[in-house]
Image: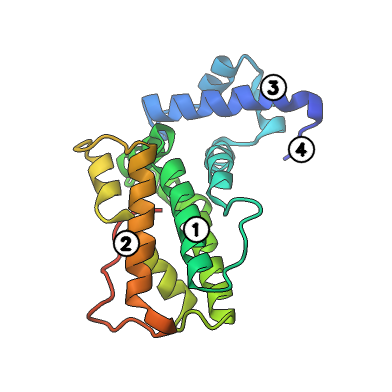
Amino acid sequence: MSAAKPGDAPARQRILHAAFSAFTEAGYSQTSTLEIAKRARVSKRELYALVGNKQELLAACIRERAQRLQAPAGLPEPHDRQSLEHALVTLGTRLLSETTHPTVIAVYRLAIAEAVRAPEVAHALDSLGRQSGRAAVTAIMVKAQERGLLSGTASQLAEQFAALLWGDLMISLLLRTVDPPDSSGIARQARGAAAAFLRLHPDGTPASAAETPFPRAGA
């Protein structure tokens, strides 16, 4: 796949926008690269040169959004419980804000709808999207462990925090039984998750199996 030049950016963005629109409207398996090229007002040759085949188009769409799931630039490393709580609230707010965006929810619904006909949609979402969020949370847990603030396995600690952060929200959003939370609701949920997580781990002690929340769907 050819690397895009600076002057190619507008065309590439049109292609990604057209691909995402077509995937969510008609389904991944029913969308052709010709249809995407028509929507983007480019030739198929240009589409393949700038992005790639249909699977690469899907990956590019997800990857572009997944970049927003990283920890905010300049977030201080946790050095005590107060700064750890601040880091968890900040990252939790970012994850909730980005993942509850209607565009992202549409990708989750697309993955579910195409689970049998095109399982690669779910695989791409998990490896490129959800893994980005997990990696960001795990990185904070590793730094907290290095400071002696937490004990246990970093990946399990990240799962615990994610379970507290999400609860049943993602399932409810997918079922359309609730509306996406607003900024104040997101901030409140992130603060509650961080506080609950730290209560599970007083003075760096690991939570017992009975206290560990069951992981729920989410980023």
Give the residue number, with chain letter if any, for mark 2.
Answer: 164
Task: Tell me which numbered mark, 3 or 1, is placed earlier along the sequence.
Answer: 3
Q: Which mark is residue 10?
A: 3
Q: Amino acid at mark 1?
A: Gln
- Whether residue 144 can be seen here: yes
Q: Out of 133 and 184, give the one closest to the viewer.
A: 184
Give the residue number, with chain letter if any, for mark 1.
Answer: 131
Task: Tell me which numbered mark, 1 or 4, is placed earlier along the sequence.
Answer: 4
Q: Out of 162 and 7, give the one closest to the viewer.
A: 162
Mark 4 nearby-residue class (10 Å; few <14, some 14–19, many ≥20): few
Q: Which mark's residue is nearer the viewer, 1 or 2?
A: 2
Q: Find out whether the residues at labels 1 and 4 contact each other: C-beta distance under 8 Å.
A: no
* Distance CA(mark 1)–CA(mark 2): 17 Å
- Whether residue 111 can be seen here: no
Q: Which mark's residue is nearer the viewer, 1 or 4?
A: 1
* Distance CA(mark 1)–CA(mark 4): 26 Å
* Distance CA(mark 3)–CA(mark 1): 28 Å
Mark 2 residue element: helix
Q: Amino acid at mark 4?
A: Ser
Q: Which mark's residue is nearer the viewer, 4 or 2?
A: 2
Task: Tell me which numbered mark, 4 or 2, is placed earlier along the sequence.
Answer: 4
Mark 1 nearby-residue class (10 Å; few <14, some 14–19, many ≥20): some
Q: Position of residue 152 (x, y in %)?
A: 44, 83
In the rendered image, the vertical position of residue 206 relative to residue 4, given as above or below = below
Q: Amino acid at mark 2?
A: Leu
Residue at (56, 15) in percent of width and height: 38
Farthest left residue in view = 177
Mark 3 nearby-residue class (10 Å; few <14, some 14–19, many ≥20): few
Task: Tell me which numbered mark, 1 or 2, is placed earlier along the sequence.
Answer: 1
Q: Position of residue 91 (x, y in %)?
A: 49, 55
Q: Dividing the picture into quarters, in which one does residue 24 lie?
A: top left
